[in-house]
Image: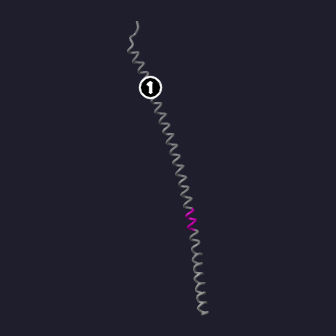
Amino acid sequence: MRITTLAICGLAAMTLAACQQKQEEAAPAADAAATAAQDAAASASQAAADAAAAAGAAADTTAAAATDAAGAAADAANTAAANANEAAADAKAAMTPEKK
């Protein structure tokens, strides 16, 4: 009975030692995986921040381009209106008989 108990205790001790060994061997791999996951999350966060900055810059550029285009269109409209006024004045002058 003693030998059986000692054998069972010895087997339990060897099993416990094997489990501890596996945990010790697995711990660095788990730490490395956790570090890699943290690095990936940080990279994804930076990529998202960069994308947001790029989108903001694109929006600013688009807004500036739209403002420039609107300004150019307004200038063209003013020039066309001035030309129309000049043409109307010329037509009026041509239609008005000379006073003698």
Q: Is residue 55 left or right of residue 90?
A: right
Q: Residue at x 41, y 18 (%)?
A: 90
In the figure, residue 3 lies in which quadrant?
bottom right
Q: Residue at x 53, y 54 (%)?
A: 48
Q: Residue at x 59, y 72 (%)?
A: 27
Residue 31 in magenta stretch: no
Quick one: 99 or 22, which is closer to the camera? Answer: 22
Q: Which amino acid type corresponds to the residue marked 1 in the rendered image?
A: Ala
Q: Where is residue 30 shown, x and y percent of the image?
A: 57, 70
Question: What residue range appears in magenta?
Answer: 32-38
- Which residue does the numbered mark 1 point to in the structure image? 81
Q: Where is residue 25 shown, x and y percent of the image?
A: 58, 75
Q: Where is residue 18 shown, x and y percent of the image?
A: 58, 81
Q: Is residue 46 above or below residue 83?
A: below
Q: Residue furthest front?
A: 1
Q: Is residue 75 left or right of residue 46?
A: left
Circle 1: is it few (<14), some (14-19), or many (20+) Cα within 10 Å? few
The number of numbered badges drawn on the structure is: 1
Q: Residue at x 43, y 27 (%)?
A: 80
